[in-house]
Amino acid sequence: AQSVTQLDSQVPVFEEAPVELRCNYSSSVSVYLFWYVQYPNQGLQLLLKYLSGSTLVKGINGFEAEFNKSQTSFHLRKPSVHISDTAEYFCAVSLTGKLIFGQGTTLQVKP
Amino acid sequence: NAGVTQTPKFRVLKTGQSMTLLCAQDMNHEYMYWYRQDPGMGLRLIHYSVGEGTTAKGEVPDGYNVSRLKKQNFLLGLESAAPSQTSVYFCASSFLAENTGELFFGEGSRLTVL
């Protein structure tokens, strides 16, 4: 069965440091890829998505992600995080017409 | 700018009781979804709808029923609640199918079954 794995359940980082949240998926066919963010006590909102084209995708709030087909990865990066980036981040993959969400990674930004 | 609105936001039930969660969207979206979120498991699709009058099962449909009588509303029902249904429930909608389009989520409904 297809799956999505977010390799870290929690990522603590200091303010203004860079961060990478890792996401791997299992599929040998073309996929669509998404990152969603969930701030405390809120619903999810779309950060960015990859459907086709350039493998480097830019999203809101300074985040970007790179699609790597050979490594079946879609890691999320930000060069300098803020306290306000503290949230849970979900990678999602569309493999058979349905979205499959990863388990989530909690980003904890410390002052 | 209401977007997707869920009611109620919190509910406590006893085992065996029934309840309905209401989701309303004002974006004229065709597609609507109900997910549940449990710690360490991400979001799992319960049921979804591709248009008024249609519904379909998702990944974890057992114990739930849904209805989409009006395009803007998507109801999730629990006929006989069980402790395993303690969760946070999210409704979402999209203009395109979820595999290509952006999903817009409500703020969630936290359900506790005792």
Image (spheres, coloured by chain):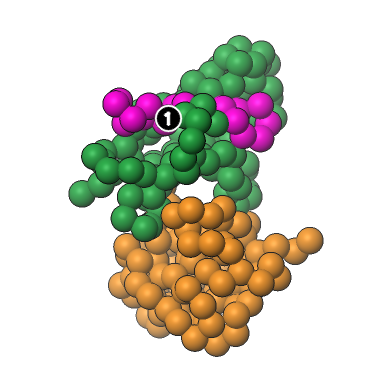
Residue A63 on the magenta span: yes
Q: Report which residue position mark 1 lands on.
A: A67
Amino acid beneath label 1:
Phe
Q: Nearer the viewer, residue A91 or A55?
A: A55
Q: Is residue B112 above or below residue A93?
A: below
Q: Judge whether residue A75 can be spotted in this image.
A: yes
Q: On the rendered image, what quadrant is the N terminus of chain B found in?
A: bottom right
Q: Residue at coordinates 40% horizontally, 53% vertically from top-left?
A: A99
**Chain letter belonging to callout 1:** A
Q: On the rendered image, what quadrant is the C terminus of chain B found in?
A: bottom left
User: Percent from the top left, x then y, of residue A80?
Assistant: 64, 16
Q: Residue at coordinates 57% horizontally, 14% vertically from top-left?
A: A18
Q: Quadrant of residue B6?
A: bottom right
Q: Judge whether residue A106 can be spotted in this image.
A: no
Q: Which residues lie in the magenta part?
A: A58-75
Q: Is residue B42 above or below residue A20?
A: below
Specify the chain shown as green.
A
Residue A69 on the magenta span: yes
Residue occupying the far front of the picture:
A53
Specify the chain shown as orange.
B
